[in-house]
Image (tube, rainbow, N blue to C red):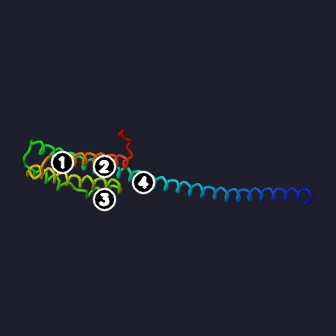
Amino acid sequence: MDGETIRLMVVAFGSIAAGLGGAVIAGAYNRRNTLATIEAARTAAETQREADQDVEHDRWLRDRKIEVYSKFLEEVHELRLSLAEVQVGFHQDTNEVVKKARDLSLLHLRVLAPRLVLAAAQDVMKSIRSLMDELIAIKERTAQNTEAYDAEADDFREKVTLLELRISDDLGIDVVA
């Protein structure tokens, strides 16, 4: 072999080696990038799944709070209406009102409601008891007049309004006072 052939063979082998080496390096680089892309996609999918679970849980919790708050407020308003009916003489039986008051429960609120809402609901319950005591005193004619009952009724309305505002705040509902 002459020098020119050897030189051409060395260049050809060098080109082949460089091509193969470049392909191996490019393959390793692409493999690393592909693995990084797959890991990033897996992490993004996991993060999205966790976010979706959080959103779904928040939605479930809000719906449950709405259900519990609505039921409690409905029972409070029904009890207030019953108290008013007994007070004005539509009904003479205070036992029915007492039973409704006993059936009114804070149990579900204790589980779901934040402290401010629960405290306001407890204030409403205390006000109901005071209002009932004044009504019974009127019915049993131990009260001299209805001023104490009227004062308790005003206090009750204020406490229910405060409870409704705190519930609206908890649910993120803007209300016009």
Q: Nearer the viewer, residue 123 or 170?
A: 123
CA distance for labels 2 and 1: 21 Å
Mark 2 closeness class: few <14, some 14–19, many ≥20 residues within 10 Å: many
CA distance for labels 3 and 1: 32 Å
SS for callout 2: helix
The residue mark sitting in front, 2 or 1, is: 1
Q: Which residue type does callout 4 highlight? A: Asp
Mark 3 closeness class: few <14, some 14–19, many ≥20 residues within 10 Å: few
CA distance for labels 4 and 3: 19 Å
Residue 75 marker? none
The residue mark sitting in front, 4 or 3, is: 3
Q: Earlier in the sequence, mark 3 or mark 1?
A: 3
Q: Earlier in the sequence, mark 4 or mark 3?
A: 4
Quick check: marks 1 and 4 in contact, CB under 8 Å? Answer: no
Residue 149 marker? 1
Residue 175 location, quadrant: top left
Q: Nearer the viewer, residue 5 or 174?
A: 174
Residue 151 locus on image (x, y percent): 22, 47
Q: Which residue type does callout 1 highlight? A: Tyr
Disc 4 target residue: 54
The residue mark sitting in front, 3 or 1, is: 1
Identify the residue shown where x is 78% and y is 57%: 18
Q: Which residue type does callout 3 highlight? A: Val
Disc 3 target residue: 111
Q: Earlier in the sequence, mark 3 or mark 2?
A: 3
Q: Earlier in the sequence, mark 4 or mark 2?
A: 4
Quick check: marks 3 and 2 in contact, CB under 8 Å? Answer: no
Residue 118 location, quadrant: bottom left
SS for callout 4: helix
> Where's the N terminus, which quadrant?
bottom right
> Where's the C terminus, which quadrant?
top left
